[in-house]
């Protein structure tokens, strides 16, 4: 992966994990974007811009094929058009959310549709209104990928954090419970990463949203509770006496000592 020098696009500078000393023999997975859009001139333009920025791009022309490709290729980001023939963007988003934690950017035709979509809480992470400039869309994709606090490109080699039986390796983005790997979604890991980075801090739901989803997220704070419940379940954390993810009454959550 190379970073084009002098790229003036927003997000071109300060990209996390700019490779300085990476081993060229190690296969480095390129960030993958899936574009689901039936209007070929648009999908082609978007793909061209994304590929220019070194993303690996897949394109699907229908909701059905988009869902299949999302399952097969596990993209990091999905650009999803709302208006598709057959299965529409809302249904595609719902289906993708049942197996994927990819960031989803929804393309909509009108601004007032965005409010409606957020109300439906279909699980998209961001919205872009048509017509849009491909440059802006690429910037939004990059902004989205900057959201996780610990870069998936592995900038830091911080030693794993330990909380009793729980080990959190932020560089590898891995969690282990009593030596066994725990399968966490991206959002669950980001929540655990945020909490464990400052174990004495009680985070409000709003603060967690800002850390994990980014500051411009708006919607219901209690979406956090759903993810925390899933996280506790996977960490075998008893919600009545949690060891790892503690409830701070009237505030939100903080990391527990693991005892
Ligand atoms: Ca369309």
Image (cartoon, rainbow, N blue to C red):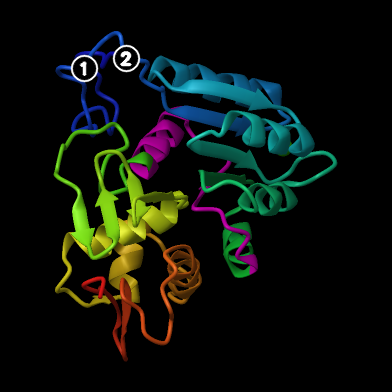
Residue 164 location, x and y as percent? 24, 65
Do labels 1 and 2 touch, CB within 8 Å?
Answer: yes
Q: Is residue 161 magenta?
A: no
- The structure residue drawn at horizontal position 53% and vertical position 22%, both measured from the top left corner, is 57
Residue 135 location, x and y as percent? 41, 29
In this picture, residue 52 sits left or right of residue 6: right
- Closest to the observer, 103 or 98: 98
Residue placed under numbered mark 2 in the picture: 26
Q: Secondary structure at mark 2?
A: loop
Residue 156 location, x and y as percent? 16, 37
The answer to whether residue 211 shows anywhere in this view is: no
- Closest to the observer, 79 or 147: 147
Q: Secondary structure at mark 1?
A: loop
| Residues drawn in magenta | 120-144
> Would the CB of label 1 be found within 8 Å of ligand 1?
no
**Image height of 204 relative to 61, above or below:** below
Q: If the picture is divided into quarters, which one holds ligand 1?
A: top right
Q: CA distance from mark 1 to mark 2?
A: 8 Å
């Amino acid at each position: 992966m190379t970073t084009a020098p002098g790229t003036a696009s927003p997000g071109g500078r300060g990209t996390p994990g700019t490779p300085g000393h990476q081993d060229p023999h190690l296969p480095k997975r390129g960030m993958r974007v899936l574009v689901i859009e039936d209007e070929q001139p648009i999908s082609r333009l978007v793909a061209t811009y994304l590929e220019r920025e070194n993303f690996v791009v897949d394109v699907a022309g229908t909701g059905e094929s988009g869902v299949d490709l999302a399952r097969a290729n596990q993209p990091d980001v999905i650009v999803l058009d709302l208006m598709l023939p057959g299965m529409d963007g809302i249904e595609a988003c719902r289906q993708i959310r049942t197996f994927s934690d990819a960031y989803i950017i929804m393309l909509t035709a009108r601004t007032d549709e965005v409010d409606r979509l957020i109300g439906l809480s279909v699980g998209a992470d961001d919205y872009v209104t048509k017509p849009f400039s491909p440059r802006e869309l690429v910037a939004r994709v990059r902004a989205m990928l900057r959201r996780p606090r610990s870069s998936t490109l592995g900038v830091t080699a911080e030693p794993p954090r330990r909380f009793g039986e729980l080990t959190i390796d932020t560089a590898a983005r891995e969690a282990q419970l009593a030596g066994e790997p725990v399968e966490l979604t991206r959002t669950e890991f980001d929540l655990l990463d945020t909490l464990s980075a400052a174990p004495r801090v009680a985070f409000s739901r709003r603060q967690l949203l800002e850390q994990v989803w980014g500051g411009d997220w708006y919607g219901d704070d209690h979406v956090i509770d759903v993810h925390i419940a899933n996280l506790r379940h996977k960490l075998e954390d008893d919600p009545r006496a949690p060891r790892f993810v503690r409830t701070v009454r009237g505030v939100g959550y903080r990391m527990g000592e693991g005892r």
